[in-house]
Amino acid sequence: MLGEMIRQNRLKRPLVHCITNYVSANDCANLLLGCGASAIMADDPDEAAEVTAMCDGLVLNMGTPNPRKLKALLIAGREANLLGHPAVLDPVGVGSSNLRKAAARLLLKQVRFAAIRGNATEIATLVRGTAAHRGVDADGPDAATENNARQLARETGAVVIVTGDTDIVTDGSTIHRVHNGHPMMRTVTGAGCQLSALIGAYITANPDHPLEAALAAVCAMGLCGEIAHRRLAPPDGNASYRNYILDAIYHLTPEALEEGAHYETDC
Amino acid sequence: MLGEMIRQNRLKRPLVHCITNYVSANDCANLLLGCGASAIMADDPDEAAEVTAMCDGLVLNMGTPNPRKLKALLIAGREANLLGHPAVLDPVGVGSSNLRKAAARLLLKQVRFAAIRGNATEIATLVRGTAAHRGVDADGPDAATENNARQLARETGAVVIVTGDTDIVTDGSTIHRVHNGHPMMRTVTGAGCQLSALIGAYITANPDHPLEAALAAVCAMGLCGEIAHRRLAPPDGNASYRNYILDAIYHLTPEALEEGAHYETDC
Amino acid sequence: MLGEMIRQNRLKRPLVHCITNYVSANDCANLLLGCGASAIMADDPDEAAEVTAMCDGLVLNMGTPNPRKLKALLIAGREANLLGHPAVLDPVGVGSSNLRKAAARLLLKQVRFAAIRGNATEIATLVRGTAAHRGVDADGPDAATENNARQLARETGAVVIVTGDTDIVTDGSTIHRVHNGHPMMRTVTGAGCQLSALIGAYITANPDHPLEAALAAVCAMGLCGEIAHRRLAPPDGNASYRNYILDAIYHLTPEALEEGAHYETDC
């Protein structure tokens, strides 16, 4: 089933409008090309709706924000909803500033997302924003994170992905816990942004299976982190690792994903 | 003759003002350093003219545009014309929005370009903009593309470069068809932006030979794509390929270009 | 002693707010992760103070400026001063435009820097700005550069680092001349920006030893340039070199720095 998500992506070659930060933009574009999709990166409100309209899917990344870019996120998100294109939100560092918190609130109010991906803190910040602090850190960090993910998924209708030591993928009822990945991925800037872009590609290519598509992307990214780690020679550090992860995405087959995906499911 | 374009570039080490998109800015800067030139990247209207004036040549890339950056493109372009610096236009995704189309129209009206590089769709969009749709797709895709290239070259006085399976380089009368390159280059984001930067360097170093300089850059980029492709080991994907192309540009000699350039010419 | 600077950095894992240019942002972020620190990159005045406040240190890089980003530099710098966070200034291309010169003057007037790093021209421009041209190029280039560095250090209270064939690190009285590094580092875009980021990390982790921390960063960067250069295989060019330098930073140990640092000191 996960392999089919890749197969559809390579077949349909979706064009994804990415409004993203300038730190990881190049890596996200190369990841999308490597996985078989492609990207247009356009972040100005004066062209956001038009660019969204000529693409098949949308990824909204909140890194390196400014008021014009945040306005573009909203415009693009609403346009994607109008056209029925899947939209993915990556609330990068949403807890870092009131600018980002306010923008996230507006986005969640005005845009229907197919998926939202963040780390535990980012997802907790989104939940607090919509749920007035109830129960967020109540049951120990892991249970709290799963509760936040489920709650955000139920409130928004989005598949919620929380990345960490174990990654969580949930639509609010089913919950997948993914054990792929390698701790060294934390030394690669924008690994989360890249995953959000991959989720965007897979969901765009598989619009009727957002949960499976997100799960496939999370397993694929983690698996490629493992493959890339095995490739490291002694002098290789995080820069070579960055390249090897992208190289692994380029070569990843449906069969390799089926074989290497490592997750468990609760319903 | 093509080798002489590289020789002059390595000798003069031109400083090129690049107003470019943030997706490929790092790669363009490394390519310029690798080929023996160097870049200043400054995209604000408040300093565009001054930065242009302290450089030897100019590359205007329309990717990730916003109104301030587009204003800077115009200011820098007019300043380059005043000073007699060669200016290169890369109309990235010009058909994607009215913002880009309007900016391109203004640029073509107010700035005299030494060279314009785009893919077939981008060049067709520029021609439609100046020529009210006549004959653009009349004679099948390839002939249409060549006609567009010639027409844009005649109307603007620029050397026009259209990249695709076969690359076209024309001044409106002579037409070169370049067969260098490798299909995998399509999986490297910003390969076109990089070529535009290289054209900018070679034309700046060879201001009296814009057609030959552009041809040399197109052959060089394609040849480096071939050299880099031969270097790929089994686990290498598009990220390693990106690095290997830049590495090949770094090592490219006039002799290797003379030997490896693969093109035919019609007058 | 230099090794201790690395040790503290790996122990404390400082979070550094970087307002930087989009050309080298990705490399700076990966360098910071590789050395054991991490970065938030946020360049808008509407969130600059908040982001500074949640970090431990600050790096202000003047590349690809625009009026909003320059305003953010000021706001972040003043906030860092209020909170007692070390702030590092990289006056990229400060001589290129009046926009940058005016911004640098304001920054030097309103913000107290722990360190300022530039090349000889950039540092000379800062000195001229504060010192009305006296003596800048009086005693031959090398002596002039050392005089500029000392003068700027005395006037600002910052450790001043001037990178070139020999790097200079001074607090206005003690002067270190660093002989690490390799000429090929000039072919890697943003190598200076990366060094400024590394200085930011080391000074943040060693706030009571800014001179030693800056010296450690300069030696570390140069040493990694040497290590990376020894790793080059024949087809490797500046793109691979860029990766190898970052890889070397990732692996650099206190012991290797102590052993490989190559500098002399005048008091």
Image: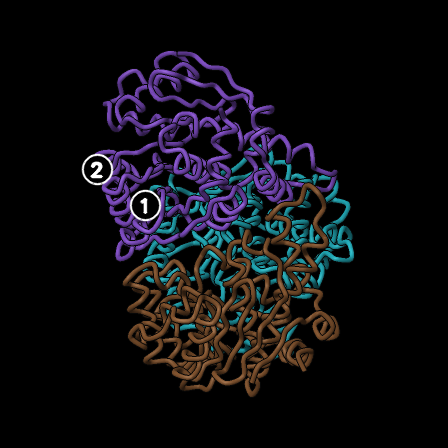
Chain colours: A cyan, B purple, C brown
Residue type highlighted by circle 2: Gln
For residue A47, which numbered disc appears in the image?
Answer: 1
- The residue shown at (66%, 55%) is C244
Chain letter for mark 2, please.
Answer: B
Give coordinates of residue A139: x percent, y percent: 63, 78
Q: Is residue C180 above or below residue A198?
A: below
Regarding residue C5, the answer to whether it shows in the image is yes
Mark nearest the camera among 1 and 2 is: 2
Query: In this figure, which residue is indicated by the disc labeled 2?
Result: B110
Provide residue C69's location: percent of width, then percent of height.
35, 65
Sort mark 1 into few (<14), some (14-19) or many (20+) by Cα contacts within 10 Å: many
* Spatial separation of the CA atoms under disc 1 and disc 2: 22 Å
Which element type, helix, strand or loop, lies under badge 2?
helix
- Three-letter residue code for mark 1: Glu
- Residue C126 vs residue A20, the one in the foreground: C126
- The relative height of residue B263 versus residue C81 in the rendered view (above or below) is above
- How far across and down, in percent of the image, does residue A238 sit? 66, 59
In the rendered image, residue B7, in percent from the top left (x then y), is placed at 50, 34
Name the quadrant of the N terminus of chain A.
top right
